[in-house]
Image: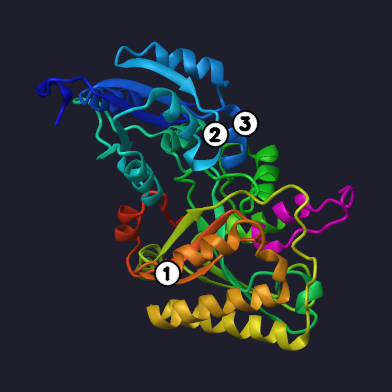
Amino acid sequence: MPWRYCNMVKKVFVSGCYDLLHSGHVEFFRQAAEYGDLYVGIGSDETILHYKGHKTLYPENERLFMVKSIRYVKEAFINQGSGILDFVPTLDIVKPDMLVVNSDGASEEKRKLCEARGMEYVVLERTPHEGMEARSSTSLKATLGHSDGNGDGLPTRLDLAGTWIDQPYVSCYAPGWAITISLLPTFEIRERCGLSTSTRNQIKRIWPYQLPKMDPEMLARLVFCFENSPEREDGIISGAQDAIGICIPGLCRHYYDNHFWPERFERCNDEKVLAWLESHLCLIPMEPRKPGCDVTTGMDITKENVQRLAKAADECWKAILEMDLNRFARTYKASFEAQTTLFPAMIQGCVQSFIDKYSQLPGVRAWKMPGAGGGGYLALVVDDAKTFCQDHGEAIDIHIRRN
């Protein structure tokens, strides 16, 4: 019940980054302030850098000034904690009666925190102010970052199965397919999180706003050659699946046999198949891969292990085309297990705790990490992605780029 109907004014607390302040934030503050005096916790520059993997657009003192200037806000603070619950130290200062969150920021952790502290926990649906368009930081960043203004911009990729087969030191033991889908950047694509941001950043050096309109396979080859210049100082040749997954729309698989570039491609742009995939896949943000992380430590590359990887990817492709969810989940998981047998150091840091947590949730059928692992995202196969994302505010639904 809004505070104006009560005898005592309550202390209400909200928290966020507010790096790209917009009307959606102001409306959220307005709605939260109906419950009492509003106090705001703001993510620090350091927290955002480590948790989201990028620098802020505006430094923390500037964000603090802007938030404090909004008439619905009684007081604001820079949070001194870290991670998703960076506002806990601010709670000790404010001692609020209530925590208010948007539905996409709700979590079981926050609910339990309120329960332990005797605070009310209120979840608001994200609604625009009357007569205004819905706004979110993610959609604004996508729009502002691309010249066409439609938010499509530079895509990224999600590898579904066969990861690592695009390296000749793997495929020399057994040839096989890698499966990728090209994703629209409808969410904030964090650095060092397994979604080929290094390749994407190389593309930005040539085409800052959007991919050129040309043959996708030729475009992917150009990107691969540009990224893997003979003058590259680290001496590492990136796998081709990143350039291919970004540049070739829809669902694609590419066949590797002891070479850096695949021998052949197979593509699927069937709308039923792509929509089916979207309805069963979502991403869970984890911590970014830490600097200096070496996922090749302790690798066990044998013919038997690579054959397992290749078989799982081949079966996964068939399951997708047949839209067989049970088989897709089983082969998707088998591919990930083959990857981590080859490269056990993929699972380090926070990864196992996320797998333990999300693998037990209702509706979750399989899981893997995109890219080389060591952190980033957990890519889940679920019964229904829309429902899962509604029930778990941290989950991100995906949108596959069409032709």
Q: Amino acid at mark 2?
A: Gly
Tell me: residue 138, above or below residue 130.
below
Residue at the spot x=34%, y=69% of the render?
Answer: 362
Q: Which residue is mark 2?
A: 81
- Residue 174 at x, y percent in the picture: 74, 84
Residue at the spot x=47%, y=40% of the render?
Answer: 85
Q: Secondary structure at mark 2?
A: loop
The local crowd at label 1, few if under 14, some if 14 to 19, many if 20 or more residues have their Cα within 10 Å, is few
Q: Earlier in the sequence, mark 1 or mark 2?
A: 2
Q: Secondary structure at mark 3?
A: helix
Residue at the spot x=31%, y=21% of the render?
Answer: 38
Side of 304 where 148 appears, left or right: left
Residue 58 seen in this snapshot: yes
Q: Amino acid at mark 1?
A: Gln
Magenta residues? 222-242
Side of 237 where 207 appears, left or right: left
Q: Which residue is mark 3?
A: 46
Side of 395 where 315 appears, left or right: right
The local crowd at label 2, few if under 14, some if 14 to 19, many if 20 or more residues have their Cα within 10 Å, is some
Q: Quadrant of the N terminus?
A: top left
Foreground mark, 1 or 2? Answer: 2
